[in-house]
Image (tube, rainbow, N blue to C red):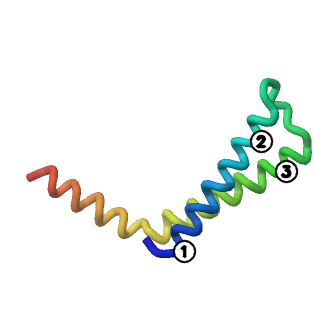
Amino acid sequence: MDETTINRTKSAIDALVEVQQLWIDNVPEYDLSDRDLLVLKKRLNRAMDNIQKIYRDNEETMNRAENALKKQHSR
C-alpha cells in the first residue's frame, strides 16, 4: 500500500477512536448534546470518506489478491 492509503487508514482509525471516546464519555445514558452530535457527524463522515477512498483506490489490487488466493485454494 502507498503512503496515501496508510495516512487515510490512520485518519479513519483516529476518527473512529474519537467516536468511541464520545460514547465512553456519555455512558450510561448516551444522551449526546447538540455539540457532541455535530462532532459525531464530522468524525463519522471523516471515517467514511477515508474508508471509501481507500477501498476505491485499492479495489483492483484487493480483487486480484482475492482471486489469486481463490486459485491457490482451488488447487
Tag 1's secondary structure?
A: helix
Quadrant in the rendering for residue 70: bottom left
Q: Amino acid at mark 1?
A: Thr
Q: Residues within 10 Å of mark 3 (few under 14, many from 20)?
A: few
Q: Position of residue 32 (x, y in %)?
A: 85, 37
Which three-letter amino acid code belongs to the residue tagged 2?
A: Leu
From the viewer's side, name the closer residue of 19 and 57.
Answer: 19
* Sequence-wise first label, 3 or 2: 2
What residue appears at the point 56 percent right and 67 percent down from the top-left corner?
53
Q: Which mark is residue 21?
A: none
Q: Position of residue 28 (x, y in %)?
A: 79, 24
49 versus 73 height, above or below: below
Judge whether 50 appears above or below 37 on screen: below
Classify residue 18 as left or right of residue 67: right
Calculate the distance from the C-alpha at mark 1 to the C-alpha at mark 3: 27 Å
Q: Compare marks 1 and 3 and give the one earlier in the sequence.
A: 1
Residue named by callout 1: 4
Badge 3 element: helix
Mark 3: which amino acid?
Leu
Res 51 → quadrant: bottom right
Identity of the residue drawn at 36% across and 63% down: 62
The quarter holding residue 71 reads: bottom left
Looking at the rendered structure, the secondary structure element under dot 2 is helix
The percent coordinates of residue 65 (x first, y second) are 29, 63
Disc 3: which residue: 38
Residue located at (48% from left, 71% from top): 57
> Which residue is at the far right?
34
Q: Farthest residue toward the left?
A: 75
